[in-house]
Amino acid sequence: MIETERLTLRRWREDDADALYKYASDERVSELALWPCHDSVDMSREVIRSFFAPNPDLFAMVLKSTGEPVGCIGLVPDGAEHHPLLDNEREVGYWIGYPYWGHGLTPEALEGLICYCRAELRLNSLLLTTDCRNEASMRVAEKCGFKFLENYDKEGIASNAYRLALI
């Protein structure tokens, strides 16, 4: 678990399925995150079981004020990266529910994850990729010190890569 000022980053639980569905069923979120819009709570529960739970470095972004998961942040599973990695580097991914866009929660969560990756995982660097249309995600990367690496094409999607040195 990772604590920030307004968030607790913790492992996903099956009883988070309703909250996940609430935000993952919004096309504004899924379109920029490049995954299918959730069409049922059962689908969200299966995503938690099959994708979130097996990844030890993937966290629900939980508001301390309400206890509700409102987003997700963590490391992309080995082999599912969107861009080539350096030695001892991992790729970061994140999304947050539409009502929380522009509230500074994602940079706060990313700063917490960066500290975890530096202190606990002892990574050399982090890679972050975004769809070129996702200006908010690019701003989050830059606010947290990631440096632009390159534009690239990922399966027909114009994308950007950023890197942050941790050592």
Image (tube, rainbow, N blue to C red):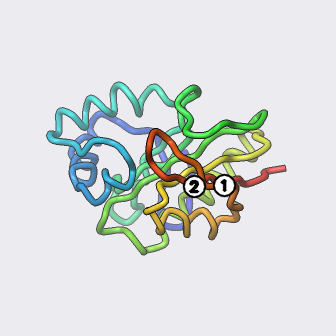
Disc 1 target residue? 150
Q: Is there CB contact under 8 Å for labels 2 and 1?
A: yes
Q: Residue at x 35, y 52 (%)?
A: 69
Q: In which quarter of the image is the N terminus?
A: top right
Sequence order check, earlier mark of 2 and 1 = 1
Element type at mark 1? strand
Q: Residue at x 27, y 29 (%)?
A: 46
Residue 58 place in picture, x, y as percent? 50, 39
Q: Residue at x 28, y 41 (%)?
A: 36
Depth order, front residue of 111/92: 92
Disc 2 target residue? 160
Element type at mark 2? strand
Residue 40 place in picture, x, y as percent? 14, 39
Which amino acid does the dot numbered 1 rest on? Glu
Query: Which residue appears farthest toward the right when viewing the image?
Result: 167
Measured Cα–Cα span from mark 2 to mark 1: 6 Å
